[in-house]
Each structure stands twice: as C-alpha cells, then as structure tokens.
Image (cartoon, helix red, strand yellow):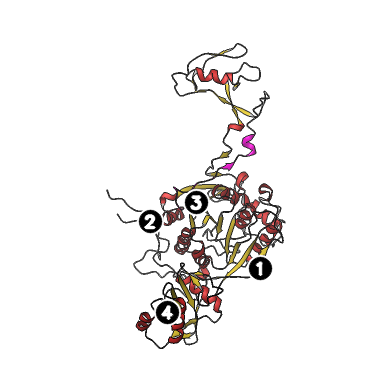
Amino acid sequence: MAHQKLELTWIGKDQRPRLEPRILLEDPARSYHAKQRVSDQDIFDNRLIKGDNLLALKALEAEFAGKVKCVFIDPPYNTGSAFTHYDDGLEHSIWLGLMRDRLEIIRRLMADDGSLWITIDDNEAHYLKVLCDEVLGRSNFIASIAWQKVYTSKNSAKYFSAMHDHILVYAKDKERWVLNQLPRSEKQDKAYSNPDNDPRGPWKSTPLHARNFYSLGSYEVTSPQGKKFVPPPGRYWAISRDSFDKLSSENRLWWGRDGQGTPNKKSFLTEVKQGVSPSTMWFYDEAGHNAEAKNEINALALNEDVFITPKPEKLVKQALTISTNPGDLVLDSFAGSGTTGAVAHKMGRRWIMVELGEHCHTHIVPRLQKVVDGQDPGGVTSTTGWQGGGGFRYYELAPTLLATDRWGNLVINPEYDAGMLSAAMCKLEGFDYAPSETLWWQHGHSSERDFIYVTTQTLSAEQLDALADEVGFERSLLVCCGAYRGVTAAQAAQRWPQLTIKKIPKMVKDRCEWGHDDYSLNVSNLPMAQKKPTEPAQDDLFTGGDA
C-alpha cells in the first residue's frame, strides 16, 4: 500500500506574500538602558520592534537566521471574539495562511538546537498541530502540554467548562535539541525527612518488595528487635539477600520508629537527581493562571485597560527554563503585554519582541523600563533574584523602499536617505551592511573580496573607470546606481569584469510587494478570498494528500 503524506489544505494555501525585507530604524528616544551595570551578565542589546510582525520577522531573517534558541508565541486564537487589542475573528482559511507564513520564517530563524512553543486553545490547536507538522516536520514534534489557565470551572458553560490551553512544542531538529530539567519543588523535597538523625541528611523510605517475580527474592529477614519478615503473599523482595545485607551494613534500612516494621530502603535526598523531567500537565500552582497574569499587569499600574488573556510570568519562566540557558536568544513575535521579554530579561536571556499595536507604547515599553530599573516586584522577580539592569533598543520598520510617484511609476521612496538606501540594498542583495570608514565605495560585503556600492547618481564611463581601478582585479563590486551612460551593458561587462552594474529601482522592482505595510492577523485589514463556483465553502477544510 502506498504511503500517504498528510497535509492541511485550505483555500488560498498556494498564495504566498512576496515580502519586502525592510530595514529597522532605531528610535533612541524610546530605547532604554540602566544608568549603571548591576552585574557582569547585564544584557543591553535586546530588541523591541513595533510593526507588522510578518514584515518584522522578514527584517530579522538576514541577521538572525539560525540564532534563536527559543521562540515563544501566543498568537490570536481565532475564537470569533472581538478583543481590545486584537480583532480575533479571522476566517479560518486566512488564519491558517497567515500562521503558515510566519512559521516558515520562524523556522529559518531558529537555531539547529532551538525550539518553538505556541500557546493555543481548542478552536485551532489541532489544525495548528498538522500545520506545524508540515512546516517543522512531524518528526520534530516534542509535546502538547495542557496548561491549566483557570482554577475554577464555570457552571454557566453550555457544554464543558474550558480550563486549559494547549502549548505545542517543536524542535528545529529533535536529534539536536536538549531540554533542561526543572528544579525540584519544595513540595517534592518535603517527602524527605531525617527521623533517625542520619548524618547523611534527609531521606525517604522506599518499599523493598514488589509484585514482579524475582528468583532470588524469597527469603526471611529479621529486624533488630528480632521480628521475622517474609514478602507478603504474591510478592518478592526486589533485591537479593546479599544486596539486603549490604544495605543493612550501610545503615540504609528503616524498620520503622519502633524497629519492628517491614524493612524499607532509605533513599537520601543528596542522591536524588536534582532536576525533574517536565510533564505534559502544567497546573496553575506551578505555571500560573490567567487571573494571576492580569494581577501582574495591574500591579505595574501601566494602564486601566487590561488584556483579556495575558500569560503569567510563571508560565513563560517554566518554558524558558526547559528550553534555554543564560545568554540564549528568545523571540516572541506576538508580544502582547511584553511578558516574554520581561521574563527573559529577568532570567538573563537575550530577547527580541515584535508588536504592532499601540500598547507597544502604553504597556510594553513602560513595563520593560520597570524591569530594567528593578521596580517590578511581581511575577518571577523574587524567584529569579532580579534586581534590575541591562536594557533594550526600540526599533520601527522603515517605510517601503519603493513608492509610486504621481505618474504611477515605482521610484525610490523620498523618505530614504543615503544610509537607509545602502542598508536596504544590502539586505535585498544578501550583503552585510558595513560602510567602510576609508573606502567610499564599500557599503557592505558578502565575503572578504565581494562588496557593494549604492548610489542614486548616474555614473559616467570615466567614473566607472576610476571605480574599477580602485577595486582592482582581486575584488568584485556590485554597483547599484540610478543609471550609467557612455557604454552598453555588454560593453560594461567586458570593460569592467570586476564590476556588476545594476540600475535602481529596475533591479528590484519585481521582487516584492512594495508598499504593503500590514499583514497583521486582523480581519479588517485583509481581503476576503474570492470563491469560485467549483470551490467548497470557506469552512470546508480537510486533511488529505497524494499517494
């Protein structure tokens, strides 16, 4: 029987945006840094980006591809409810398409040993699982965690009272991903005590008999008080007589407080693995809940307006504890109230967050300023020992590179200065933007011998002669100019083999969707897919595939 490849299908799946790789412009007035170092581990170069998150992900790709250790995102759940900061009622097909476009770039940003964590509810969780299988590979699926987001059920629920969300966890490469264990809780350690004042410290008793047959497990033992014991009917000692005697000689047997109880093994806390393997059930007492998250935001006194479904700091801390180490890079492209960045900062991780809404200014910036100043006493501040420090840079997406003039022609956007244009062309052509302080024609490089020069001027043959002489024959130079004169393209290639000459904007005009500023998960900003008479209804979705 032929093997079937399952994949999710929806109307418009084949339509992919031709994204413009925008440059990022820092606004120093909104960037924020501590006035002094708190420790040698302070991190100052975190990034908060305001803008459409799909364009922002594309803007980050050239610099950060393969460098993000953990992506933690909380996308709009597509529930049909109108939220204050998100219009969360997208058509199902559009939601899937927009998530797919983001996941594809996120995968490229992830480190080979990185992981992706997505919080989602039942409305889209199972479709999203299949979509993630397709984008990241089903073999890289790690777990679906059930997080208890509320701690009381609602009797007003029509069917079931929803008490949990899902957290889908994927690795970029499952064979290379290594998770960290969670620290032992105080509750787990309470099982250990030291009733006999053993100098080796706290211990707990572990039964020495089991139901499984063991050929060497049928023998009689005698307690210090002379009481004899054999395993209960149908059970056997789990160790041999020699091993039993060895435990006795090492004072590792417990016969009860009166010395006449069934023998148990003393298991010492110091011998127990100090980490705990994560489970797929995260209860509210360990990972927080929605009400706790709202209280955390209210305590910051940022704004009376409260997010409907914020995520608690405990939840993010648990995910980052498992998936990252200090200094690792964390990305959240649906920043919301800024919880991921706040927690990553307190945990000594580098972070990048993206948010389109105005609450980037009203909530996220002031929240992070309080974190940097050490004036955020809530959340995970105490458990991380956070005292302030570090900082972040605030960026916005540059406007589109090519604009339409009054005659309908694509021209270089007049808002671009020479530096912005050079940086944009470097990004479009795959060069690192690095203007030389000594060589006027070196605006960027792709290797030690391959460079790029960007100008809006019309270059003459004499100017190109001089430029070719400076470059020499051991280096190559891509010349992006407004125009050139005096030679044909064929003559230029023969005359200056070390130069590749292209005209702006002609060289890039067909590459991207210029002037498209909003790919957000907001139905009011998106056109409705056109139905053809032969197509199924918008909600007629299915899984299937070719043999």
Residue 502 badge = 4
Range shown magenta: 170-189
Determine if residue 511 is in view: yes
Q: For numbered disc 4, what is the local secondary structure?
A: strand
Dominant SS type (magenta)? loop
Q: For numbered disc 1, what is the local secondary structure?
A: loop
Q: For numbered disc 3, what is the local secondary structure?
A: strand
Q: Which amino acid lies under the numbered mark 3 shown in the image of this protein? A: Leu
> In the image, is residue 3 above or below residue 227?
below
Q: Which residue is mark 3?
A: 168
Instruction: Return the residue found at the far top.
Output: 226
Q: Which amino acid lies under the numbered mark 2 shown in the image of this protein? A: Glu
Proximity of marks 3 and 1: CB atoms separated by less than 8 Å? no
At horizontal 34% and vertical 53% (from top left) the residue drawn is 5
Quadrant in the picture for residue 190: top right
Q: CA distance from mark 1 to mark 4?
A: 37 Å
Q: CA distance from mark 1 to mark 2?
A: 44 Å
Q: Position of residue 70 (x, y in %)?
A: 53, 54
**Which mark is nearer the camera, 4 or 2?**
4
Q: Which residue is mark 1?
A: 30
**Which mark is nearer the camera, 4 or 3?**
4
Image side of residue 256 versus residue 418, left or right: right
Q: CA distance from mark 3 to mark 2?
A: 17 Å
